[in-house]
Amino acid sequence: MPWTENNHKLKQEFSFKDFKTGLDFVNKIGQIAEKIGHHPDIFLSWGKVKVETTTHDQGGKITDLDRQLAQMIDNLFVEFSHS
């Protein structure tokens, strides 16, 4: 499912079989965010992870960095889907 654009943010929701898998996914997103120096808002609940990203230092706009991060998160989700 493609990311949606709403209120100058890219947004996506991911589903998992349980809380622990969602938490593991969130931790991996955190590692990616630290590596590239771009940090999304992440919301974790049982079996679901919601991610929102925008570039605050560009006035809260969606930039190429947000799109790159979204693609990296999508790639990560594919890895989680195959494990």
Image: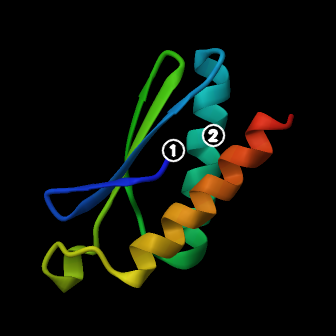
Please tell me which residue is depicted at 54% across the width and 68% down the height of the picture: 34
Q: Is residue 10 above or below residue 51?
A: below
Circles 2, 1 touching at the beta carbon (< 8 Å):
no
The quarter of the rendered structure image containing the C terminus is: top right
Q: Earlier in the sequence, mark 2 or mark 1?
A: 1
Quarter location, residue 15: top right
Nearer the observer: mark 2 or 1; the answer is 1
Please tell me which residue is depicted at 45% across the width and 72% down the height of the picture: 67
- The numbered dot on residue 1 is 1
- The numbered dot on residue 37 is none
In percent of width and height, residue 70 lies at 50, 62
User: Under tag 2, what secondary structure?
Assistant: helix
In percent of width and height, residue 71 lies at 57, 65
Q: Is residue 57 above or below residue 67?
A: below
Judging from the image, the colouring scheme is rainbow
Amino acid found under the numbered disc labelled 1: Met
Quarter location, residue 73: bottom right
Question: Spatial distance from mark 2 to mark 1, Cα to Cα?
Answer: 17 Å
